[in-house]
Amino acid sequence: MSEDFNPDQKRYLEGFMSGMQSARAARGLGPLGGAPGSGKAAPSGPDKEHTEAQGRTIAAGGKLVDQEKWKAAEHPFDAYARFKDQANAGIYPKPEDNFRWRYHGLFYVAPAQNSYMCRLRIPNGILKAWQFEGVADLAEKLCGPYAHVTTRANLQVREISAENAPLLLEGLADLGLTAKGSGADNIRNVTGSATAGIDPLELLDTRPHARAWHHHILNDRSLYGLPRKFNVAFDGAGSIATLEDTNDIGFQAIEIGEGAAFDGQPVAPGIWYRLALGGITGHHDLARDTGVIVAPSDAVAVADAIVRVFIANGDRTNRARSRLKYVLDAWGFDKFLDAVEDKLGRKLIRIDAAFAKPRPVYDRLAHIGVHEQVQSGLNWIGVALPVGKLTVAQMRTIAAIANTCGDGDIRLTVWQNLLISGVPDARVEDALANLQAIGLSAETSILRAGLIACTGATGCKFAAAHTKEDALAIAAHCEPRITLDTPVNIHLTGCHHSCAQHYIGDIGLIGAKVPVNEDGDTVPGYDLLVGGGYGVDGGMARPFREKVRAEDAPALVEAVLRTWAAHRATPDESFVAFARRHEIAALQALVAETGGAA
């Protein structure tokens, strides 16, 4: 038993382990930890850190949430044979196994759809054209014949029957892809700069660091089963925002100038990562600068130490307060970073922010259209996708375009679209023509370029509105009525999980049930917020209007946009700047006067 425990805690932990052994025996599973008949089971093996954290929680008088009990009773990676037995029998999981199968990337999404959804893991959002085509083949055979690009630069496929679920996972493995750990209490898909390695603006190519972290996670079981999900992003300061400040860990490339020092020693000038921690927009927080800088080659080690401090100290009694943000709020940054240094066995480097040069400014339209790469004569083409959806036929053609006109890479973005990279000047028109032939384009309106929507009630049981359909309705309504000349982001999310990150939208809409009579009947709708932002404009949107029926949302969005256009302080004033210089009541009055829909 660990010497970190006092005698009372040891007794609690032994009792906890005894209960877990009984639960495992009831399932016909072998003992966990110590040898059979030893009288007690000391935590050991790759799950040791998690078992000890659970034991400390119980010893302190806490009550583990169900998910913690499920993890302890049977680790999801030990249950794959049972999963296949269920699949062969055509059986969908009960809640505890629905949670476990999410470790394998499968989400049973009833009652929205009586089927699984699968979320992949694609480090830095980049995959090969043949892999993309392979996913299309799998979707056509085993899923609904389409895929969604997500806000984590990832792919989701849906409408997967119980029988087809193992075939999909194993088919992905045949393609060199995986869904392992893409759901539940795990480190999610690792995001990085969409234009990494090809961007004239970037400070750093994030691909090797995202890839190294991806494989570090995949090959270490102790990094699964955290107190709650965990997001990590690497931003190389390229043209397209990675939204790293919405992650639990955000590595932000910066250039350090001459003269910086730490502990009396000079810090080498050049490109470093700035470390930001605690982003979780659904809980009204962006990742905050820690004052720490990290050598890119050291990013994996630092991330590992941070995660292990979270494993040991995250809340396992309350799912609403189990994210890293709440450890930081309770401890403060200094105490947390001290614990990270203890894990690392050395000091983190801190410097005065004055030695960090300003980062390049994002181009909010760089994810759409044709853009010159740093490699002379080559371009990336940003393909506009209607709220992230692609048919399998479109996927196959995109793969063919990437192979014949580009460098064979397909780059997914956090803006729910994709890039085809390495296109020579002479092949751009061919690529654009082939996109047009399948109903896609590298051109779209400013409004649609910033239109983001989660799956919504069509495929998610938590959502209170049909976000993708309603997003397209907003675009269809607004485009003929108002022409925008400055980028604006409109984010629609279906529920408090905030998958579409409505709090950082210029205009954010979160699904809500809208009462329509005194009997308590409701219809789908939204609460509308304004003035969110990311990066240098980082901040949470403020509530503007509650309980707007979905059918009324397009007109209200039009009215808000029209008010901005009419009352900007200067012709180039951004929406976020406009919204933030007005109190909400004053903004509501302006919309009522100008837009007529407040």
Image (spheres, helix red, strand yellow):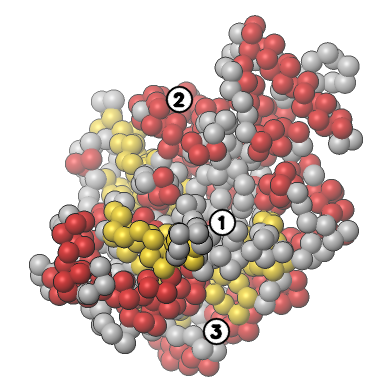
Identify whether 387 is placed above or below 529: below
The residue most toward the top is 7
Q: Which residue is mark 3?
A: 401
What SS does tag 1 mark?
loop
Task: Classify the position of the C terminus by image quarter.
Answer: bottom left
Q: Residue at x 48, y 77 (%)?
A: 386
Q: Count neighbours of disc 1 (C-alpha within 10 A) and say few if under 14, some if 14 to 19, many if 20 or more.
A: some
Instruction: Give residue 254's mark.
Output: none
Q: Which residue does the numbered mark 2 point to in the structure image?
A: 339
Q: Quadrant of residue 115?
A: bottom right
Residue 359 visible at all: no
Residue 44, given in percent of the width and then of the height, sits at 72, 25
Cα–Cα span, label 1 and label 2: 36 Å
Percent x, y of residue 453: 46, 67
Residue 256 image point, x, y percent: 26, 45
Local crowd size for mark 2, using a 10 Å CA cut-off: few (<14), some (14–19), many (≥20): some
Type of amino acid under label 3: Ile
Is residue 73 toward the left or the right of residue 312 in the image? right
Nearest to the observer: residue 213 or residue 79: 79
Q: Report the side of 590 relative to 235 (left or right).
A: left
From the viewer's perspective, tell me whether residue 71 is left or right of residue 493.
right
Quarter of the figure with the N terminus = top right
Q: Position of residue 402 (x, y in %)?
A: 54, 80
Give the number of the mark in front: 1 or 2: 1
Q: Are marks 3 and 2 in contact (CB under 8 Å)?
A: no
Q: Residue at x 67, y 56 (%)?
A: 107
**In what element is the residue under mark 3?**
helix
Q: Nearer the viewer, residue 201 or 521?
A: 521
Sequence-wise, which precedes: disc 1 or disc 2?
2
For label 1, the residue is 462
Q: Amino acid at mark 2?
A: Ala
Regarding mark 2 in the picture, which secondary structure is present there?
helix
